[in-house]
Amino acid sequence: MSGIDAPERRQAYGERSKQHLAAIVFQKRARVVWDKRDRYGRIVGRVYAAACDHADCAYSLDAGLEQIRAGLAWHYKQYQRDQSPSERARYAALEDEARARGEGLWQDAAPVAPWNFRRHTAASTLSAVDDLLLSGFPRDAAMTTVRDPPITGSAR
């Protein structure tokens, strides 16, 4: 989702953040407004959920903003230039309010931002590979990747 970065699955508050997002959008009418893809080809956009279950309800609930309000995501300031000035101000203000209330992940004395968690996790993975290589593990074995075999037959 554009404008936010939420805790990773294995990170503190990651599961809670996922559950909160699911409560907002899972099996509900939603709309994604997007105009770009990330470097992995994934759609990056704002997710709006219908405010109620009636067919005539507007898609007015900004799921990313609700994640920030609940203290379960950061305003992703690295990409704030992709937001309109008013959206940028709303996201930043709601993050400040969630911090001040000690909401969600802001209960922790020093919450770890997802981008730092990912960087540390990547560094740990590289360190583990280096440790294997230094211990005499064959380089080719440490660097081999395995692909799932293609699915054959028909899925029913």
Image: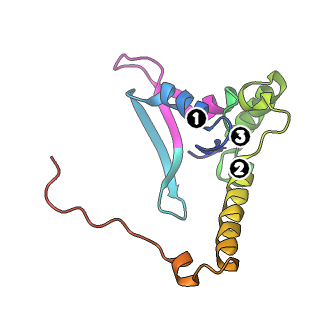
User: Disc 2 on helix, strand or loop?
Assistant: helix
For marks 2 and 3, give the one nearer the viewer.
3
Image quadrant assignment for residue 38: bottom right
Picture coordinates of residue 98, whole percent (x, y): 76, 27
Q: In this rendering, is residue 56 above or below 12?
A: above
Q: In this rendering, is residue 7 above or below 67?
A: below
How crowded pointer 1 is (Cα within 10 Å; few <14, some 14-19, many 20+) is rated as: some
Which quadrant does the N terminus fall into? top right
Q: Would residue 80 appear left or right of 48 to someone viewing this image?
A: right
Picture coordinates of residue 125, whole percent (x, y): 65, 64
How crowded pointer 2 is (Cα within 10 Å; few <14, some 14-19, many 20+) is rated as: some
- Residue extent of the magenta highlight: 46-67
Q: Is residue 109 visible?
A: yes
Scheme by which the image is coloured? rainbow
The answer to whether mark 2 and mark 1 are in CB contact below 8 A is no
For marks 3 and 1, give the one nearer the viewer.
1
Q: Nearer the viewer, residue 97 or 88?
A: 97
Which residue carries the number 2 mark? 80
User: Disc 1 on helix, strand or loop?
Assistant: helix
Picture coordinates of residue 130, whole percent (x, y): 69, 74
Image quadrant assignment for residue 106: top right
Q: Amino acid at mark 1?
A: Glu
Which residue carries the number 1 mark? 15
Q: Nearer the viewer, residue 111 or 144?
A: 144
Q: Tell whether position 62 is magenta.
A: yes
Name the N-terminal-most of marks 2 and 3: 3
Name the N-terminal-most of marks 2 and 1: 1
Which residue carries the number 3 mark? 74
Name the N-terminal-most of marks 3 and 1: 1
Disc 2 versus disc 3: distance between alpha carbons? 12 Å
At 76% from the left and 37% from the top, the residue drawn is 92
